Amino acid sequence: MNAKLKKTKAELVENIYESTNIEKKEIAVIVDEFLLQLKNGLAHGETIELRGFGTLLPRLRKWRAVARNPKNGEKASMKAHYTAVFRAGKDLKEEMLKLEVGEEK
């Protein structure tokens, strides 16, 4: 596995450009619009299924009387709210199983 564990949106655009030769500006617009559609769908409570990749869905986090602020450790209550959850599809799960496990850092 590559030592770099992050990939930026700009790097994704570059990779798509190299494999398609579509103009980078057009690719960037499409990627931005794709992400906007995902965000808008989730914000409206929709589940987004990307066959062969996975599913994005809004999930309700319940109200908690006692929670901890990770920045300062103070106790606080947390109201119910939605969060985005990703559930990997079968094909992606199979690809992830092929990753080699390295030493922990």
Image (cartoon, rainbow, N blue to C red):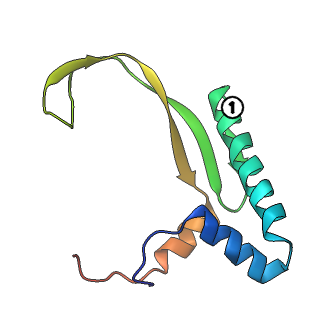
How crowded is the residue under tag 1: few (<14 C-alpha within 10 Å), some, or many (20+)? some
Kindly tell me whether residue 65 is visible in this rendering. Answer: no
Q: Residue at x 34, y 81 (%)?
A: 101
Residue 78: x and y in percent read: 30, 19
Residue 103: x and y in percent read: 24, 82
Q: Which residue is mark 1?
A: 46
Q: Residue at x 68, y 25 (%)?
A: 44
Quarter the N terminus occupies: bottom left
Up/down of 80 relative to 90, above or below:
above
Say whether residue 65 is left or right of residue 90: left
Say whether residue 72 is left or right of residue 42: left
Residue 82: x and y in percent read: 49, 27
The foreground one among 105 and 27 is 27
Q: Residue at x 56, y 33 (%)?
A: 58
Q: State the SS at label 1.
A: loop
* Residue 10 location, quadrant: bottom right
The foreground one among 54 and 44 is 44
* Residue 74 location, quadrant: top left
Up/down of 21 relative to 59, above or below:
below
